[in-house]
């Protein structure tokens, strides 16, 4: 049972004690060793255990004063100070509650030389802490609420085998495979976003284009509205434009539009002379999802998921007398990553240094390339080729030799010294990956919305260590 001053006094769950809301988080785990039963007599199975459990956990990671209305000091024009509304109270605000079920099976086979374990889990989080949109008349955009829900399920599978076991030689190997899937199942109704886009005719008059509703919200993290959290999707998927290469000719750009016209990019509705621009040869071919002939927010779709399909480790240990060699691989398959660093170094829209990929940029009619033309953002022909799209989404799958260690156990026979070992190791030995960045194993931050984003941080370098282990 836990309490926190961050909780509202009128929280729905828990119990009220001493004027404070307390959350109850029980846990129960049980196991049945089937192989100990008298009736169990299966040849080749030395040990068999069935496990299961249920637990409730909470999360109170919110602002300290999220349940209260308060003002904060601000400065205007470096000359005057004032207090402005910073938060709207929500006395019902409480912790997130996660209910988790798990069931597993562990077994030892072939005279305990093969060990296998598998566990399935399913969890549901309700009262998800979210930012709910509020009316503009409040002076704020959002307030804290418990109006969200999410579910997770997955499976972990582990295998360990003793391949060789002799007097001087021992060889052990194993691997693990993990898979999970999460899905947002509820969000505040006020977070249902309607995207209304408009196109303009040749005279600058507004004509209705399209409308799309998303029950969720987008976040701008190293880009514009590029991270989507919406009902029916995993948390923090990449949201942008799909592409179909680069227009080699003007004829291709015209064919991609509607009714034989150029594919267009709306730039505004106030100045008719600059209301839109045509995509031309050398521009990125963004997919017109609704077929209206315009490339705008209504054409944005989910273009990547930072969550891997499977992940795990592969390891082995080889011993000969007093020498022992341990090798550990780590892998991840099926996860998409946003190469933000490359999006800056291959944007071709400024005077910064660019990567050598810019050598293949489009330069003449009919050229076949996947790099668009160079175009300054102040140009009258600029159509935002560098916008957030699957150009910057890459396969982040990798296999990495994380650690290799050689240990020598020194033979000692002293009453006060139980063991003495000397060892040497190397970490991050090598990586196999198609990812074009420095290192596919990264995260721009600890939050769920920062996963799979390469912000250009230093990669995990190879390092060597020597040490001595003394057991007294």
Image (cartoon, grey):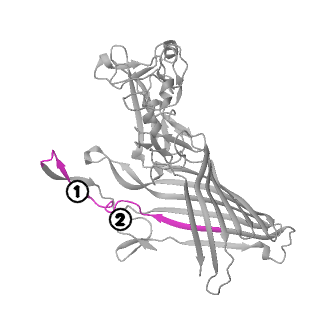
Q: Residue at x 69, y 77 (%)?
A: 411
Left/right of residue 211 with respect to residue 404 in the rendered view: left
Spatial CA span between label 1 and label 2: 18 Å
Residue beneath label 2, please? 8
Residue 131 drawn at (x, y percent): 38, 51
Q: Residue at x 86, y 72 (%)?
A: 41
Q: Indicate the secondary structure of the residue bearing disc 1.
A: strand
Residue 431 drawn at (x, y percent): 60, 47
Q: Is residue 11 above or below residue 344?
A: below
Q: Indicate the secondary structure of the residue bearing disc 2.
A: loop
Q: Is residue 322 above or below residue 61?
A: below
Give whichever of discs 1 and 2 has the lower sequence position: 2
Dot 1 surroundings within 10 Å: few (below 14), some, or many (20 or more)?
Answer: few
Q: Residue at x 45, y 47 (%)?
A: 457
Location of residue 407 (image quadrant): bottom right
Instruction: Judge by depth and name the residue closer to the eye, 316 or 63.
Output: 316
Residue 357 drawn at (x, y percent): 50, 29
Residue 331 drawn at (x, y percent): 63, 51
Residue beneath label 1, please? 71
Q: Are marks 1 and 2 in contact (CB under 8 Å)?
A: no
**Region rendered in magenta:** 52-79
């Amino acid at each position: 049972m836990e309490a926190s001053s961050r909780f509202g006094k009128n929280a729905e769950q828990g119990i009220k004690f001493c004027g404070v809301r307390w959350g109850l988080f029980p846990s129960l785990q049980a196991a049945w060793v089937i192989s100990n039963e008298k009736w169990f007599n299966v040849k080749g199975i030395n040990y068999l255990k069935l496990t299961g459990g249920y637990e409730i956990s909470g999360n109170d990671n919110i602002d300290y004063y999220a349940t209260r209305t308060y003002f904060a000091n601000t400065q205007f024009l470096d000359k005057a100070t004032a207090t402005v509304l910073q938060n709207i109270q929500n006395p019902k605000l409480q912790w997130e509650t996660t209910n988790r079920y798990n069931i597993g099976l562990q077994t030892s086979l072939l005279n305990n030389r093969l060990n296998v374990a598998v566990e399935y889990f399913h969890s549901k989080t309700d009262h998800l802490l979210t930012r709910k949109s509020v009316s503009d008349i409040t002076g704020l955009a959002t307030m804290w609420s418990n109006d969200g829900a999410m579910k997770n399920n997955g499976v972990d599978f582990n295998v360990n085998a003793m391949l060789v076991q002799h007097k001087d030689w021992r060889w052990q190997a194993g691997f693990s495979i993990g898979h999970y899937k999460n899905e947002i199942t509820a969000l505040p109704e006020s977070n249902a976003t309607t995207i209304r886009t408009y196109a303009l005719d040749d005279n600058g008059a507004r004509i209705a284009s399209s409308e799309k509703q998303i029950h969720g919200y987008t976040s701008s993290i190293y880009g514009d509205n590029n991270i989507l959290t919406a009902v029916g999707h995993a948390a923090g998927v990449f949201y942008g434009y799909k592409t179909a290469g680069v227009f080699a000719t003007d004829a291709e750009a015209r064919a991609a539009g509607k009714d034989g016209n150029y594919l267009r990019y709306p730039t505004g509705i106030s100045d008719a002379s600059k209301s839109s621009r045509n995509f031309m040869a050398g521009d990125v071919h963004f997919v017109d999802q609704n077929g209206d002939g315009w490339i705008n927010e209504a054409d944005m779709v989910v273009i990547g998921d930072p969550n891997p399909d499977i992940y795990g480790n592969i390891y082995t240990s080889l011993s000969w007398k007093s020498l022992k060699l341990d090798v550990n691989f780590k892998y991840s398959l099926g996860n998409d990553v946003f190469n933000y660093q490359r999006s800056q170094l291959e944007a071709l829209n400024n005077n910064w240094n660019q990567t050598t990929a810019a050598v293949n940029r489009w330069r003449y009619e009919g050229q076949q390339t996947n790099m668009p033309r160079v175009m300054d953002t102040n140009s009258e022909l600029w159509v935002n080729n560098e916008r957030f799209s699957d150009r910057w989404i890459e396969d982040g799958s990798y296999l990495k030799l994380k650690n290799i260690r050689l240990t020598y156990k020194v033979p000692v026979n002293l009453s006060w010294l139980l063991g003495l070992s000397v060892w040497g190791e190397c970490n991050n030995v090598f990586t196999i990956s198609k990812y074009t960045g420095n290192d596919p194993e990264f995260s721009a931050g600890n939050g769920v919305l920062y996963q799979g984003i390469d912000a250009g941080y230093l990669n995990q370098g190879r390092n060597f260590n020597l040490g001595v282990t003394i057991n007294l």
